[in-house]
Image (cartoon, rainbow, N blue to C red):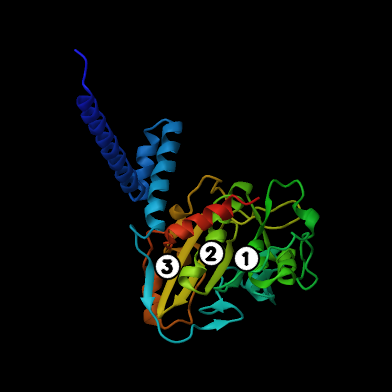
């Protein structure tokens, strides 16, 4: 018996509805999984084939990132704050106090640049930390990429050849893209001095690290106003070095601060050298307290104690929301050559 048109239409409608609800349930389940504690996630990954585990990681974090960026899920570390921020030489909340040896700390040089400040270690031959400012507002045209150069002001500065054939990228601490488009070509040339560079694994430098740099420069300022960033290297636990003597850090961090309409917002991330190209930055969020325990560095010490303690103790569960426009900006930025 042939099925009439009305019956086919009803079945098609039911199939579409079933497909919609199946996709919705899958999306919600993936989002829920992405927010489980890391220990529970890892336990499940170990029981799955490698391919299936990677697909679960990718699609669960993709769904969570989408709802986080739209502001539907997650929360930030944000407090009410009136008045001007304590900022010295583009470093918000006071200079970080490194928990390294007294010798390294004593020898560290503070080098003022256009739009950023470098705390450089002649012993490690890379920066301990770098602070840069990302103003809100219109951006400058992109400048041609300049060559890397030794820094005449930095003691024991590396040479460009010191990184050749090492397997490591020359990773900017004050980002090329941000400095170029926010502060102009002369500042960009300063960002290519090797006092601003650390050895970074290619997967990290070209993957999650790059994504965060684009969010900070291209997406968040239009929503959250001026942004200040402290970027640092976590010293090698095994004293690993390149043949030229440049220390290879275990990992890198960012402390990102925005202040707009009496709201002070802080986000901290830590990424190890092994954070590969496909890693989602949202999985690398830590509280400032956790970062201080990991690095031995004291951040934001010049903020009032009650503000500092609250911001540092709370761990955000998402990257800052960007909205639909912000997501489109990020995609355009990431697919630029």
Judge the density around disc 2: few (<14), some (14-19), many (≥20) Cα neighbours within 10 Å. Answer: some
Q: Earlier in the sequence, mark 3 or mark 2?
A: 2
Q: Are marks 1 and 2 in contact (CB under 8 Å)?
A: yes
At a point 51% along the width and 63% down the height, the residue shown is 219
In the rendered image, the quadrant that contains the N terminus is top left
**Please, which residue is most extreme toward the top here?**
1
- The relative height of residue 28 versus residue 212 in the rendered view (above or below) is above
Q: Residue beneath label 2, please?
A: 216
Image location (x, y in percent) of residue 331? 53, 52
* Quadrant hosting residue 233: bottom right
At a point 65% along the width and 74% down the height, the residue shown is 115
205 or 69, which is in the foreground? 69
SS at mark 1 in the image: helix
**Please, which residue is most extreme toward the bottom here?**
83
152 or 227, which is in the foreground? 227
Number of marks in picture: 3
SS at mark 2 in the image: helix
Q: Residue beneath label 1, please?
A: 178
Q: Which mark is residue 320?
A: none
Image location (x, y in percent) of residue 106? 65, 76
Q: Residue beneath label 3, please?
A: 289
Image location (x, y in percent) of residue 207? 57, 50
Judge the density around disc 1: few (<14), some (14-19), many (≥20) Cα neighbours within 10 Å. Answer: many
Judge the density around disc 3: few (<14), some (14-19), many (≥20) Cα neighbours within 10 Å. Answer: many
- The relative height of residue 180 versus residue 236 in the rendered view (above or below) is below
- The relative height of residue 252 versus residue 299 in the rendered view (above or below) is above
Q: Please state if 326 lies on the left or on the right of 98 as rendered.
A: left
Q: Earlier in the sequence, mark 3 or mark 1?
A: 1
At a point 68% along the width and 49% down the height, the residue shown is 168
At a point 46% along the width and 69% down the height, the residue shown is 223
Q: Are marks 3 and 2 in contact (CB under 8 Å)?
A: no
Q: Please state if 141 lies on the left or on the right of 76 as rendered.
A: right
């Amino acid at each position: 018996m042939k099925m009439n048109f009305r019956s086919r239409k009803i079945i098609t409608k039911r199939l579409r509805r079933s497909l919609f609800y199946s996709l919705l349930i899958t999306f919600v389940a993936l989002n829920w999984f992405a927010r489980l504690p890391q220990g529970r996630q890892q336990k499940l990954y170990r029981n799955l084939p490698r391919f299936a585990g990677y697909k679960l990681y990718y699609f669960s974090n993709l769904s969570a990132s989408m709802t986080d960026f739209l502001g539907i899920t997650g929360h930030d570390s944000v407090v009410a704050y009136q008045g001007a921020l304590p900022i010295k030489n583009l470093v918000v909340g006071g200079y970080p106090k490194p928990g390294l040896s007294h010798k390294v700390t004593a020898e560290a040089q503070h080098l003022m640049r256009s739009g950023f400040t470098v705390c450089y270690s002649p012993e490690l031959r890379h920066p301990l930390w770098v602070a840069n400012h990302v103003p809100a507002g219109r951006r400058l045209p992109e400048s041609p990429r300049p060559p890397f150069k030794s820094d005449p002001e930095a003691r024991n500065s590396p040479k460009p050849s010191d990184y050749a054939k090492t397997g490591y990228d020359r990773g900017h601490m004050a980002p090329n893209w941000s400095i170029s488009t926010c502060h102009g070509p002369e500042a960009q040339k300063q960002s290519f001095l090797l006092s601003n560079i650390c050895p970074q694994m290619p997967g990290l430098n070209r993957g999650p690290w790059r994504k965060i740099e684009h969010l900070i420069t291209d997406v968040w300022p239009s929503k959250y106003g001026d942004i200040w960033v402290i970027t640092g290297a976590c010293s090698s636990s095994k004293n690993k070095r390149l043949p030229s003597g440049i220390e290879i850090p275990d990992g890198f961090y960012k402390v990102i601060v925005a202040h707009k309409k009496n709201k002070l917002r802080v986000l901290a991330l830590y990424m190890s050298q092994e954070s590969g190209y496909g890693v989602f930055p949202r999985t690398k969020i830590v509280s400032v307290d956790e970062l201080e325990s990991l690095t031995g560095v004291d951040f934001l010490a010049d903020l009032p104690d009650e503000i500092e303690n609250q911001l540092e103790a709370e761990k955000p569960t998402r990257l800052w929301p960007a909205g639909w426009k912000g997501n489109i900006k990020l995609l355009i930025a990431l697919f630029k050559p």
